[in-house]
Image: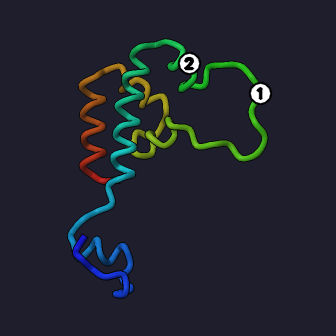
Amino acid sequence: MLRIPWTAKKTNERVLNEANKRRSLVRIIRKRQAIFLGHVMRRGKLEHLVTTRKFEGKRNRGRQREKIMDGLVTWLGTGKVLHTLTAIKDRDLWRDMIANAYKQGT
């Protein structure tokens, strides 16, 4: 990034601070997940049932995996899954929420 040799023993955070950059991979992934989720939820087909957990069956043993919806709720700051699902129906509101969360960098 700044042509720093590996022998300088600088941490990634220090190099990012010197270059005035931020880590952006997680933000990009969350943004793409949100865009995809909005697309799927407005369609209302099988993917809608899977993402809202409205299907029958047994749970797997062990620790539960983090759901996409749970991660997006915390990223968007909506508080509850229900608020997020109602916001998805309004496309303009959903786009604004994604843009604001992406700008904040959370």
Nearest to N terminus: mark 2 or mark 1 = 2
Identify the residue shown where x is 30% and y is 21%.
Answer: 90
Q: Quadrant of the N terminus?
A: bottom left
The spot of residue 61 in percent (x, y) is 78, 40
| Residue 11 vertical position relative to residue 87 in the rendered view, above or below | below
Circle 2 is placed at which residue position?
Answer: 49
| Residue 17 vertical position relative to residue 58 in the rendered view, above or below | below
Identify the residue shown where x is 43% and y is 30%.
Answer: 83
Identify the residue shown where x is 43% and y is 20%.
Answer: 41
Q: Secondary structure at mark 2?
A: helix
Dot 2: few (<14), some (14–19), or many (≥20) neighbours within 10 Å?
few
Dot 1: few (<14), some (14–19), or many (≥20) neighbours within 10 Å?
few
Circle 1 is placed at which residue position?
Answer: 58
Q: Which mark is residue 89?
A: none
Disc 2/disc 1 C-alpha distance (Å): 16 Å
Q: Secondary structure at mark 1?
A: loop
Identify the residue shown where x is 24% and y is 34%.
Answer: 96
Which of 34 and 76 lies nearest the eye of the viewer? 34
| Residue 26 vertical position relative to residue 7 in the rendered view, above or below | above
Residue 70 horizontal side relative to residue 87, left or right: right
Can you tell which quarter of the image residue 64 is in?
Answer: top right
Can you tell which quarter of the image residue 31 is in?
Answer: top left
Three-letter amino acid code at the position of disc 2: Leu
Residue that sits furthest to the bottom in the current view: 8
Can you tell which quarter of the image residue 51 is in?
Answer: top right
Residue 46 horizontal side relative to residue 9, left or right: right
The spot of residue 72 in percent (x, y) is 44, 40
Three-letter amino acid code at the position of disc 1: Lys
The spot of residue 70 in percent (x, y) is 51, 40
